[in-house]
Amino acid sequence: MSLKHALLGFLSMDSFSGYDLKHYFEEQVGFFWTATHSQIYRTLDGLVGEGLARVERVVQHDRPNKKLYHLTDAGQEELQDWLVSPYAVPPVHHTLLVQLFFAQELEDSEVVELLEDYAERLQEQLELYRSEAFRAHFEKARGKRELFLWYRTLDNVVSVAETELAWVQQTLRGFRDLTGA
Amino acid sequence: MSLKHALLGFLSMDSFSGYDLKHYFEEQVGFFWTATHSQIYRTLDGLVGEGLARVERVVQHDRPNKKLYHLTDAGQEELQDWLVSPYAVPPVHHTLLVQLFFAQELEDSEVVELLEDYAERLQEQLELYRSEAFRAHFEKARGKRELFLWYRTLDNVVSVAETELAWVQQTLRGFRDLTGA
DNA sequence: GGACCCATGTAAATAGTTACATGATTGC
DNA sequence: GCAATCATGTAACTATTTACATGGGTCC
């Protein structure tokens, strides 16, 4: 479960509320990990239950009260352990490839449409990655080393999306050559 | 739910038992979709329940009896509809990037180890993709068009894995330059 | 006798999404 | 008064994995 550890990761930098973290997942790490607020709140509960975080109730007057989560020593240790745990190949699930694999049943034009639509989605993704949206938060990096790590994570998804886009375009060319579509 | 539609896809080619399909997921499309037998059996039940497939009990003497699943007209229609449904960007979950993003807490050597380990996993993946394992089944393609589609699906995961590998190597170089590790 | 393949399932747990639900405060 | 942001939660559902469970047949 990486969400748990991503939360510990954030809490190792500072103390946050569930609401803060929700925004961090949208704006900070949304390009490589997403989570909904309902999952975040439940997972934070779990962290407290496991003694990996503790909660502080903060009374606010200008806005609704909130719960600030702090990392415990046990939480810091759990995070450290997990950070060096070797990569386990995740189960693969690539919906578009399922569609393409069984596309023999489709008209040529439908296959082309499918691929063109995918290309558009990838373009949108790339534009989002290249916008300031994610980079804006990189200024919070504590030094060059962290900044490097953050840029490289973003570069990963950019590279992969570019590769997918090149793959679609090549596939479209090949398909048109083959079918005359 | 793509598993449901991947099953319909297979059943549109021929009739299969759950056991057959389990093997198809390992050997035929395992590089872009995985499923366990427990999920396959339950999903097949679901297909029958929805009227998208029907089941034929086949008595065998040299081996245990089996249940052959056949696509119904409704199943064929459901498949056709799904095949042209536009791509929806799936939620992103990339565990290694979570580790790297929060790797500021780690020693230089631990970061290097993490990346080198990832590179090894990617190499293994690539070797698997390039082996005969998946291509062996491509001979069942009904014509050039289908063969093209199948090769392109495999090429997708190969390209992405190659990109990831190049990304790791570039990241390792950059990290070593920066830290002297 | 034992390993291995064939064949099918259930149960429990984990992970994640979507929908439902509430309420305060700020700024227009 | 209304929209937007802040803030937290629960319930139901979907998807997936892992573990448990069984039993026949073949081949060495």
Image (cartoon, coloured by chain):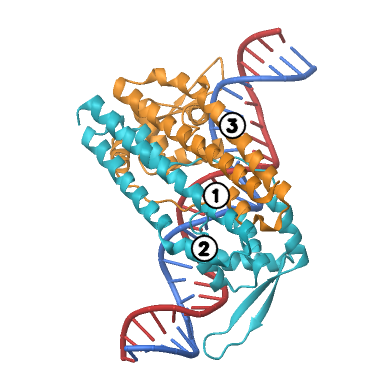
Chain colours: A cyan, B orange, C blue, D red
Asked which quadrant contains residue A147, the reply is bottom right
Q: Do labels 2 and 1 share a chain?
A: no
Q: Which residue is drawn at 65% across and 71% down?
A: A14
Q: Which chain carries label 2?
A: A
Task: Name the residue carrying label 2.
Answer: A28
Q: Is residue B140 above or below residue A92?
A: above
Foreground residue among B61 and C26: C26
Q: Do the residues labelled 2 and 1 touch (CB within 8 Å)?
A: no
Can residue B72 be seen here? Answer: no
Q: Which residue is drawn at 54% across and 52% down?
A: A153
Q: In which quarter of the image is the C terminus of chain A?
A: top left
| Left or right, residue A82 beside residue B138 | right
Residue B135, disc: none
Foreground residue among B35 and A67: A67
Q: Helix or strand or loop: what does disc 3 sit on?
A: helix
Q: Are marks 3 and 1 in contact (CB under 8 Å)?
A: no
Can residue A140 be seen here? Answer: yes
Q: Where is residue B53 in the image (x, y as percent from the top left)?
A: 37, 36
Q: Mark 1 lies on which chain?
A: B
Q: Characterize the local packing of mark 1: few (<14), some (14-19) or many (20 or more) Cα atoms within 10 angstroms.
A: some
Q: Characterize the local packing of mark 3: few (<14), some (14-19) or many (20 or more) Cα atoms within 10 angstroms.
A: some
Q: Residue at x 52, y 63 (%)?
A: A28
Separation (CA) of disc 2 from disc 3: 30 Å
Residue B123, disc: 3
Q: Helix or strand or loop: what does disc 1 sit on?
A: loop
Task: Name the residue carrying label 1.
Answer: B94
Q: Do labels 3 and 1 share a chain?
A: yes
Separation (CA) of disc 3 from disc 1: 18 Å
Q: What residue type is labelled 2?
A: Gln
